[in-house]
Image (cartoon, helix red, strand yellow):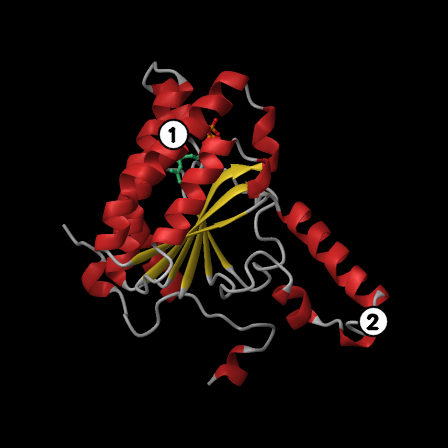
Amino acid sequence: MSTFLEEIDHTSLPRHIAVIMDGNGRWAKKHGKPRIFGHKNGVQAVREITECAAETGIEYLTLYAFSTENWGRPALEVTALMHLLVETVKNEIKTLMKNDIRLNAIGDLNQLPKKTHDALISGIEMTKDNKRMTLTLALNYSSRWELTEAIKVISTKVSDGTIATEDINSELISAHLTTHNIPDPELLIRTSGEHRVSNYLLWQIAYTEFYFTDIFWPEFKKQHLLEAILDYQNRERRFGKTSDQLI
Ligand code: FPP
């Protein structure tokens, strides 16, 4: 069986892959289990994909773990997800250290339950000097929230004279987003057959290639990540130019 690994061109890897992990609930239902069973198995996929991304040489991996809209799910599921996050972050610190992976988080972290918030902040602090890959969890994140916050900060700076209206450009806006220290993703993967971006990194994905797969997140394995990277490498990214101009 081809592993895809030998087909990948390591000189033209996407630096940053963003993922919308979707389908945990449907995967659990398919197996006659409660939704949280899907999330628990989703954590296994997170581990496998993080490891594979780091081994392949991806510099930034950003996972959509909890959106601002997810608070609307049944209270039991939200509580279980928050608990799972605490457990996962705590359990994975050793592996992150061993693999030189820096943990990062984007989103309105102050609104998370204290235990989740504290586990996350401690994981971020412990791994802050790691260099091989940055693993960012989007937690209580939504693009509209992020852009709204950025606009508030920028307008305050304009009114107090720190910046002039004419200084506002796309670099300045990017610098006020939660992703200011992360390059824009070259590749966005969404699992489970849904073709939406669901309020995820809307500003940052202006030139991102999208990859959709029908596979449910708990079934998304190394092979599938490598297949997505290979698919990305076979595309021509034109950034608004013509093919001839790229030669
Ligand atoms: C989408 O599946 C998944 C989520 C909203 C949560 C993702 C969480 C995990 C994979 C577990 C914890 C993560 C980390 C990073 C430790 P869904 O529930 O929307 O599935 P459905 O669309 O089939 O209902």
Establish if 60 lies above or below 144.
below
Looking at the picture, which amino acid does disc 2 mark? Gly
**Residue at x 61%, y 25% (from the top left corner):** 72
Q: Who is closer to the viewer here, 236 or 35?
A: 35
Quadrant of the image occupied by residue 132:
bottom left
Q: Earlier in the sequence, mark 1 or mark 2?
A: 1
- Residue type pointed to by label 1: Leu
| Residue lying at 59% horizontally and 43% vertically, measured from the top left | 108
Q: Residues within 10 Å of mark 1 (few under 14, many from 20)?
A: some
Q: CA distance from mark 1 to mark 2?
A: 45 Å
What label does residue 244 carry, if any? Answer: none
The residue under label 1 is: 84
Q: 243 or 126: nearer the eye?
A: 126
Between label 1 and label 2, give the one nearer the viewer: 2
- The quarter of the picture where residue 58 lies is bottom left
Can you give x and y, in whole percent of width and height, for residue 222 in the image?
A: 25, 48
